[in-house]
Image (cartoon, rainbow, N blue to C red):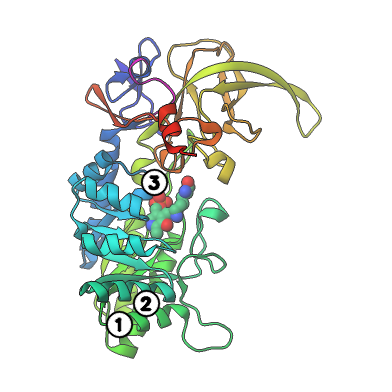
Amino acid sequence: MTAPLGAPWPSSAGRGDDGVLVLGGVSVTALAAEHGTPAYLLDERDFRERARAYRSAFEDAFAQVGTGVDVYYAGKALLTVAVARWAREEGLRVDTASGGELAVALRAGLPGAELGLHGNNKSDAEIAAALDAGVGRIIVDSLVEIDRVADLAAARGVVAPVMVRVTTGVHAGGHEYISTAHEDQKFGLSVNAGPGGGDAPAVEALLRVLARPSLRLLGIHSHIGSQILDAAGFVEAARSVLRLRAHLAARTGVLVDEVDLGGGYGIAYLPGEETLDPRGVAASVAQAVAAVCAQEGTALPRISIEPGRAIVGPAGITLYTVGTVKPVLVTDQDGTTRTRLYVSVDGGMSDNIRPALYDARYHAEIVGRDSDAARVRARVVGKHCESGDIVVHDVDLPEDVRAGDLLAVPATGAYGRSMASNYNLLTRPPVVGVADGGSRVLVRRETVEDLLALDVG
Ligand SMILES: Cc1ncc(COP(=O)(O)O)c(C=O)c1O
Ligand SMILES: N[C@@H](CCCC[NH3+])C(=O)O
């Protein structure tokens, strides 16, 4: 028997009678023995459930107001061949943000027409690869790039389907670095004209696309940020994009077919934290879209969204082995002195940069055994040469935590492996898929030989 754990753990996670964590029907002790640590473990069923939940929530909400939806899984969160296939099997398309992500999606056998290509500075080679694969949409991000895509498409004798990425001024998300639609950052083209008047950069871009015969203007794209926990920002951005669409139609007679509202749907990282309900946000956005279109007298566009974190984040946990335990005396702000237990694991900021980059908070538990020991305030740290190499800032762990214990950090499926590095020349951990009582390596562990093979000096 296993007792389910609930959020922020994956849906199949539970504790067995012996206290050992079981994921996808396999105990973490068996997974550690077979695959080693650190390892990213991915609950396939959880991934598929979330993909289905987002798809059905948005399809149902927009069907009610009379239009269709495409869900693009944002591959930047985590893209492997198997993950791309799971997404497709659940009826999702895939959004890529580089030539590398595009190559993985294509290797997975996904049709080009079901892929999108993003990026604020795509290279000629990336654009060419996308055109050659016949991607369904290239999301253009600057005037320079519009010309670049148009020239490359013309040279190939093809017409490239493009969306223009706009910034609406809506600022949302968990950290300044992951909020992407406010004005002072590198993404998109503003819907607002500058103080000198004239056309807003977004309008200028849309007109430029319409003027190039080798481009087909598919629609307008907006992405407002990441780890967003309420619907208000999505609603505001949708209104702004739909007004821009109506403005373009009034001015040129071209009513674009599609509006993409991006990703950014937030998840729970800590026990007790809220997660965004896809049905609630889908209903609010669908109503807003319908209301603005009615007001503007425009037909409804087809809608697309690009969730990444919300699909794969909660499906993943990172499994580590504890190496050292060290009590450190710390003085609190009120002057009291107490002990903090520093628990070092066999990974760190190279497998999860989010605590160092965004001050992101995670949870951790000892998962390879039961313990009745009293809980003590602990900090889980990695093995890198940085004092900021923190995996979990504050967590209560059993005071008998010791070297050799397995420790798991939940909700690391998104932006863990995809932002991993080789700092201190650590080798990146494998991605292991777990389902139905079995496990399978999806991306193998890097070896020192891999690192040495790259160094050809
Ligand atoms: C254009 C675009 N789409 C989708 C995403 C996916 O975001 P999230 O993983 O927060 O859903 C991002 C990243 O924030 C993005 O920049
Ligand atoms: N990498 C970010 C997400 C935003 C990046 C995509 N625009 C994170 O870990 O939260």
Asked whether the residues under the numbered discs 1 and 3 touch, taking CB atoms below 8 Å apart as contact, a structural biologist would say no
- Which quadrant of the render holds ligand 1? bottom left
Q: Residues within 10 Å of mark 1 (few under 14, many from 20)?
A: some
Asked whether the residues under the numbered discs 1 and 2 touch, taking CB atoms below 8 Å apart as contact, a structural biologist would say yes
| Mark 1 residue's CB less than 8 Å from ligand 1 | no
Rendering coords of residue 413 (x, y %): 39, 38
Disc 3: which residue: 77
Disc 2: which residue: 147
Q: CA distance from mark 2 to mark 3?
A: 29 Å
Task: Judge whether 217 appears above or below 49 on screen.
Answer: below
Mark 3 or mark 1, which is nearer the start of the sequence?
3
**Left or right: 262 in relation to 299:** right
Mark 3 or mark 2, which is nearer the start of the sequence?
3
Q: What is the three-letter code of the residue carrying label 2?
A: Asp
Please, what secondary structure does the residue beneath circle 1 have? loop
Which label belongs to residue 212?
A: 1
Mark 2 or mark 1, which is nearer the start of the sequence?
2
Q: CA distance from mark 1 to mark 2?
A: 8 Å
Residue 37 figure quarter: top left
Q: Nearer the viewer, residue 433 or 310?
A: 433
Q: Depth-wise, is mark 1 or mark 3 nearer the camera?
A: 1
Looking at the rendering, the stretch of residues picked out in magenta corresponds to: 33-40
Rendering coords of residue 455 (x, y %): 47, 37
Task: Judge whether 274 appears above or below 148 on screen.
Answer: above
